[in-house]
Amino acid sequence: MTKTIEFRLKTNRLIEKQLLKLLEKGRYIYNLALSECKKRLNRIRADKRYHELLEIRRTLKKQNQPTTEIDEQLRDIIQGKYNLTKTSIEKFVKDNAGYLKEGFNSQFVQVLADRAVDAIKKVLYHKARGVRFKGKWDNILASVNSKSADTGFIFDPDSISITYRELSIPLVLEYRNNSGYHRWYLEQRIDNYRNHNKKDISYIRLVRGIIKGHNVFYVQFVINVRPVDYTEEMVELENARIAQYNAELIQKAIEKGKPTNRLRPKPFLSSIIEYPETNKIIELIKSAGLYKEFRTSLDMGPKNMAIVLQNEQYLLSIFQPVFDRLIEYERQLRVLQRRLDRQRRAANPDNYNPDGTIKRKKHLKWKRSKGYIETQGKIREIHRLIRETRKTAINELSTILVALGNSFRVEQNSYKAWQSNYGKSIGSYAPSYFINSVLSRAERAGSEVVELPLRSALSQRCICGSRQKKKLSERLHECSCGCRAQRDVLSAYLGLFCNPNSGEWESELTRYDHQADRQLLAASHRVYSQTASRRGLSFALCLDKGHLSRSRRNGDGQVSEADESVRVYQNLNTLIGELALAKSGQLSPGIPCL
Ligand SMILES: [Zn+2]
């Protein structure tokens, strides 16, 4: 398992200048490689035979026939005739980079050339629309790296710094939120250098970031780690297995008379142990005995999301805006982009036609005013904030959910379907990132993941089984059977009982549950309708069925409306805190929802 560990670099003006110079060279080299790739791509696209083959391939695909032969011929054209390969582009750049190669590690050149080839291949295979050259201001070249820890940036374990030629840059070791994470990896890395000949360090990468208009440099160590829960015996066993596998690999090659130097033996387990996550909330979940306890169902809407968790004792429901901070950033971004456009027009009046469109002429010269550069800096800063906020918000919530749930249900593509309706704005990307993050983590943790067919249309259903169309603006559900609920909470709830094969809602299965659960649904209706401003509204509800069955589960299981077993909390985190307290015997105060 590889992991990237990032440290900030202690720089001064001189170091910064040198590093910028290095990246500037890298930028030229990347652009050189990319322009050559583009030329070769154009030649491929002008090739008649290539298009004929593509046509044949399309027909074969339609008839569901194998295309391997055609693929081979296509590959011959791309790689053989027009030389669009990494090796060839690498060579081209080496022959043509001239003075740029001075003071520039030859593996950096290779890596950059490879990146350019990857970018153009995306265009060739229609995975991207076009390529962008790296600019001085926009789309900057943010990183360079070599392919191993032996060349390029070298880590010095004695002075805890990285060196590049005569340049030596110390790492920052004091961190504001010091959780021990950086120490943990630093110590093991030093040990790996001293005692294991740095075998578990893949390579070292220099990264440039811009924070509030200032350059910040980081060093990233791409390392192999092993899971924290491996015992020494397990490691020995696994390593023995790997050794045997490698021996067999070599043996087979020898028997077949193949050369052994091109084999890829499996690496032994890393000596670096993964950092044990000590997340407070996760600890609470574990101590409260709630770890992987719940069946979980998620409902994503364009503005809000609802999550319902259920186990023997509890039914929990969370309602919260879909990362509303991102939407706020997006608004700011739109304002800034309009300003940028105005500033560009003001500084370059000659580049525009009287009707406001840009002149159609090659090589227009653009001036950048001071204000323009300033605005550009602000835009860059917001983009950075968006990236980080999205990462932390999504990480936090999905980690908690995966710790709580043992199975996850989500309506298939519901989050993707409306993504196209709401455009490709940044805010609308967050939900699908979030769902993907939850589902992939859940799968890795061995939990069950069920995607429900879209035709189940859970948002149109009621727990009584009736079906009525709702407008998108109707956020409250009120049925003649007496069921009341907040719409998103209800459809997340129904997801728990939806048959993934038929898309039908299994209303008969657990009649008693539904009777009791109505209280929680009704509470969601109440909280939602009583809140004046629903913008940014979030709440967490908890129905304690254990409490219920102790006090009332007699006879027909009828439950009165005014039971105090539903409690309301601000959000999921406080709810978990309360549950942990309740488990430890201290009575949870909570707010009963009446
Ligand atoms: Zn109903």
Image: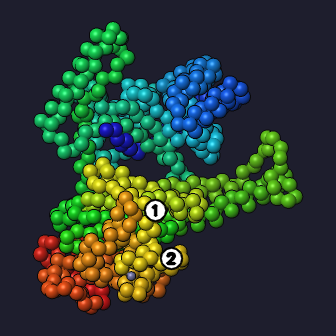
- The number of numbered discs placed on residues in the rendered structure image is 2
Quadrant housing residue 240: top left
Amino acid on which disc 1 is placed = Leu
Q: Which mark is residue 454?
A: 1
- Ligand 1 resides in the quarter of the picture at bottom left
The answer to whether residue 163 is above or below residue 377 is above
Residue pictured at 28% horizontal, 38% vertical: 225
Quadrant housing residue 542: bottom left
Tell me which label, 1 or 2, sits earlier in the chain. Answer: 1
Q: Is residue 33 visible?
A: yes
Q: Tell me the SS state at disc 1.
A: helix
In the image, 128: left or right of 198? right
- Which one is nearer the viewer's eye here, 398 or 186? 398
The answer to whether residue 364 is above or below residue 268 is below
Q: Quadrant of the C terminus?
A: bottom left
Packing grade of label 1 (10 A; few <14, some 14-19, many >=20) is some
Q: Position of residue 166 (x, y in %)?
A: 45, 27
**Residue corresponding to mark 2:** 469
In the image, 17: left or right of 316? right
